[in-house]
Image: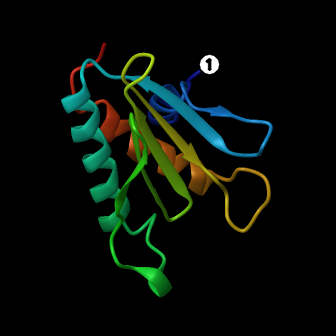
Amino acid sequence: MVVDKEAADKRKLVSKWHPTTKGTLKRNYRVPSKSEGRRLLKAVASLLSDDDHFTDATSHKGCQIRRESAHGESVCCNNVRALFDELPTPHLTVEITPFPAGPLTEIDYIKAEKLERVLRSGPSV
């Protein structure tokens, strides 16, 4: 039985992404330090701003990183939310919400794949 290697690799890339009961696709990612977490959040924000899979022509102003709490920052745009939180340990949570509301589609998995490539660009823990 010959398995399509590219398809298998793609599945491997998104294997850590899990559908949630809210109908979103979610990934938790531990980061080694606060500065690395910020760097990844900026990288995610710039991917969301530049990539055609994520852009929505009506509201394209780039993605702003906002302070969420005393120890967390997030970027929300184009149906993707990335939250970097320093406590209890530095970690990044990335969530993709399908739009319009409905089941997760191939497009959501393509987004997950692109985000995963950005997340893996840094040193892993």
Residue 99 vs 60, above or below: the answer is above
Q: Quadrant of residue 98?
A: bottom right
Q: Which residue is mark 1?
A: 1
Residue at image point 68% right, 45% down: 24
Q: Secondary structure at mark 1?
A: loop
Q: State the quadrant of the C terminus.
A: top left
In the shown orientation, is residue 8 left or right of residue 32? Answer: right
Q: Looking at the image, which residue sits at the far bottom?
A: 58
> Whole-percent x and y of residue 100?
72, 68
Residue at image point 76% right, 46% down: 23
Q: Quadrant of residue 13?
A: top left
State the residue in front, 122 or 107: 122
> Whole-percent x and y of residue 58?
49, 86
> Whole-percent x and y of residue 20?
73, 35
Q: Residues within 10 Å of mark 1 (few under 14, many from 20)?
A: few
Residue at image point 32% right, 22% down: 31
Q: Is residue 8 visible?
A: no
State the residue in front, 87 or 96: 87
Residue 71 vs 23, above or below: the answer is above
> Whole-percent x and y of residue 49?
33, 66
Q: State the quadrant of the N terminus.
A: top right
Residue 50 vs 76, above or below: the answer is below
